[in-house]
Amino acid sequence: MRVVVQRVSAASVTVAGEVCGQIGPGLLLLVGVEEVDGQQDIDWLVRKISQLRIFNDDAGVMNLSLLEQGGEVLAVSQFTLFASTRKGNRPSYSRAARGDISRPLFEQFVDSLSRVLGRAVPTGVFGADMQVALVNDGPVTILLDSRDPE
C-alpha cells in the first residue's frame, strides 16, 4: 500500500457536487492498494501514520503525532498512486489492485485507523470521480510505502 500523507489546515472531497467528507486541521491521506497488499501492510501504515511526528509543538518544532495532536483525518482511495510510465507517456495502472481487492483493503485500513484514533475517519466514495480540495499546511507531504518501510 502507498499513502500520500498531507498535513492540512482543511480538506474536503466532493462527488457529483456533494461534499461527502471534510476536515479541519489534520491529515489528508491518499491511499493506493496493490494486489499483494494485506493486513500486515494496513497494520504498518496505521501505526506509522498515527505515530508520525509531523505536527508542531509549542516551540514550533514538528514533534507531535496525530495521536498527541488530535487532528482530524480524511482518507481518499487513489489507484493512480501505482501509475507507471516506464514504457511511454500514458500511465499504466497494472500494479493497482482491482476494485474487488482494493475496496475491502481500503475499508479495513480506514476501520483500523478509526479504531486507533478513537474517532471516525471520513472518506470519499470508492471508485467515484472525486474532487479533492486541500490547504496543505507547511507544506508537509510525505509518501509512505508499506513495501519499502524506511
Image (cartoon, helix red, strand yellow):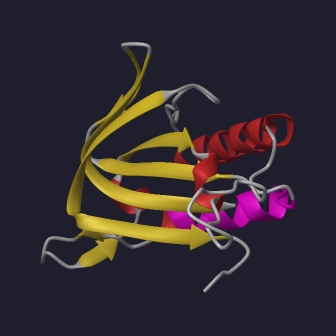
The quarter holding residue 110 reads top right
Left or right: 11, with 126 as reference point: left
- At x 14%, y 71%, the residue is 58
Q: Of all residues shown, which one is farthest toward the bottom?
A: 150
The quarter holding residue 126 reads top right
Left or right: 42, with 27 as reference point: right
Provide residue 26's location: percent of width, then percent of height: 33, 50
Left or right: 119, with 115 as reference point: left
Quarter holding the C terminus?
bottom right
Q: Of all residues shown, which one is farthest toward the front?
A: 88
Instruction: Indicate whether residue 15 is drawn in magenta.
Output: no
Instruction: Indicate whether residue 39 is drawn in magenta.
Output: yes
Can the viewer see residue 46? no
Provide residue 92's location: percent of width, then percent of height: 69, 56
Quarter holding the N terminus?
bottom right
Can the viewer see residue 21? yes
Of residues 114 and 96, the one nearer the viewer is 96
Total numbered circles = 0
Provide residue 76's location: percent of width, then percent of height: 52, 40
Of residues 37 and 61, the one nearer the viewer is 37
Magenta span covers which residues? 36-49
- At x 62%, y 62%, the residue is 2
- At x 24%, y 55%, the residue is 136
Q: Of all residues shown, which one is farthest toward the left?
A: 59
Q: Is residue 39 above or below residue 122?
A: below
Main SS class of the magenta portion in the image: helix
- At x 70%, y 53%, the residue is 93
Q: Is residue 93 above or below residue 19?
A: below
Of residues 124 and 74, the one nearer the viewer is 124
